[in-house]
Image (cartoon, rainbow, N blue to C red):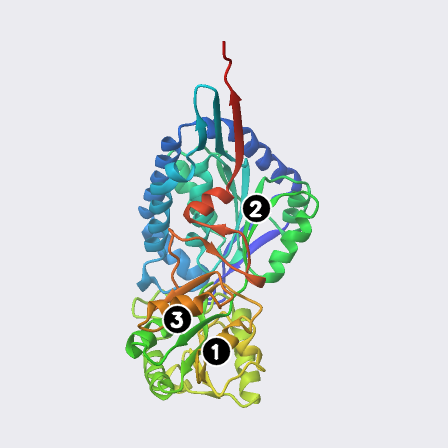
Amino acid sequence: MTMIQCISPVDGSVYAERSALSLEAAKDVVARARKAHRAWAKRPLEERVQLVLKGVARLNEMSDLVVPELAWQMGRPVKYGGEYRGFNERSNYVASIAADALAPLVVEESDTFERRIEREAHGVVFVIAPWNYPYMTAINTIAPALMAGNTVILKHASQTLLVGERLVQAFVEAGVPEDVFQNVFLDHETTSALIAAGSFNFINFTGSVEGGRSMERAAAGTFTGLGLELGGKDPGYVMEDADLDAAVDTLMDGATYNSGQCCCGIERIYVHESLYDSFVEKSVAWVSNYKLGNPLDPETSLGPMANKRFAKVVREQIADAVSKGARTLIDPKLFPQDDGGAYLAPQILVNVDHSMAFMREETFGPAVGIMKVKNDAEAIALMNDSQYGLTASLWTKDPERAGRLGREIETGTVFMNRADYLDPALCWTGVKETGRGGSLSIIGFHNLTRPKSYHLKKVTA
């Protein structure tokens, strides 16, 4: 029997462990979900929506349990109160648009014909969720999938082993039928075997690029729909007319919040030469104010990375960049809690360039590189010099300029004067090795359903 463990970054202990399901037991979960689908899909849409919202409300009632569990599992400080703000915002928004998003597209309704396109639930949706924002990333798919009439099977990352249990507990206690929303613990082999067998009608995976490739390989030939949100190396560009203080505040927060473990976190910044020195100076002061420490301490503002192996990658990238001429600006003496393991001090690097892995590969930690640029053309070339494309953050007082530059940037979302935020009214999507498909917004509902056309010729005398 395979045991799946969560090793806490707080102290290196085994915080939780669960037995992985056998292939036969996993198949039984899928069979129950498939059997439950028809009855769930036949329920009125508003009833499904309200049950999901009741599940969301029930999870909110569990905050005293959920918030410290998150700290123990992946290191986010308790002072931030978990993920409820984004979790609630996304759930409430998709509930508000569900009726419009799923409404039939009527082409003709006459004495002779009825012609329309309806949205029909796929069936069983498999959600494979990540550890960095385990509640918010999961709800992106869970809420609209259930509202649309799908049944959902959730598999969470081992680092956040308890999150799936908490979500299902909340939703079932709120009235969602047990077989409609199920949590599973699976090893990689069983997961791949289920996918290869065509067990699911749609799969949403958030994780690494290599994980996405594994999903595609497993699903090859099954024609199963895949939504993939993978790696990122999101850039910020500070133009000469930017609000400097606002840019520093938002971009440094975007680079370091959650110990830099954000899908759309800022990992590289390009600053116009006229603002470069001031931006760097203010950024160093901003980052130096963090308090690194135990995430259960309410005074801690920067917790450990989720696993010491993730911190090892960040340290290796920084060391490689320094060996090639980069310079670190944050004084390590300010962060004596950096233990060489999961507890990692934040860092800013200058004298960086794209020959360094630190400016090309996903870092996913509280470290960011800053480069000086002369003009928009240079900034665009550098922003596009990446195999990833999730978001880009542009800082200017000119919306027309931001729109013009945005059309030249290879990315899923263009921000102006903000960063590191997911707007549930907009499609969350990426290009290149960041993945394919899109969640949230009306488009998210469309990806979780299929079009079904009705061409009805009426009998005439």
The first of marks 3 and 2 along the sequence is 2
SS for dot 1: helix
SS for dot 2: strand
The first of marks 3 and 1 along the sequence is 1
Query: Which numbered disc covers residue 203?
Result: 2
Seen at 54% across and 64% down, the residue is 231
How would you rate the neighbour count of disc 2 (Cα within 10 Å): few for under 14, some for 14-19, many for 20 or more?
many
Report x, y in % for residue 185: 56, 47
Q: Nearer the viewer, residue 71 or 456?
A: 456
Q: Residue furthest bottom?
A: 325
Query: Which numbered disc covers residue 377?
Result: 1
Q: Which residue is mark 3?
A: 394
Seen at 68% across and 52% down, the residue is 217
> Which is closer to the viewer, label 1 or label 2?
1
How would you rate the neighbour count of disc 3 (Cα within 10 Å): few for under 14, some for 14-19, many for 20 or more?
many
Q: Is residue 402 left or right of residue 192?
A: left
Report x, y in % for residue 293: 38, 73
Report x, y in % for residue 163: 45, 51
> Which is closer to the viewer, label 3 or label 1?
1
Report x, y in % for residue 175: 38, 33
* Quadrant assignment, res 337: bottom left
Q: Is residue 395 left or right of residue 1?
A: left
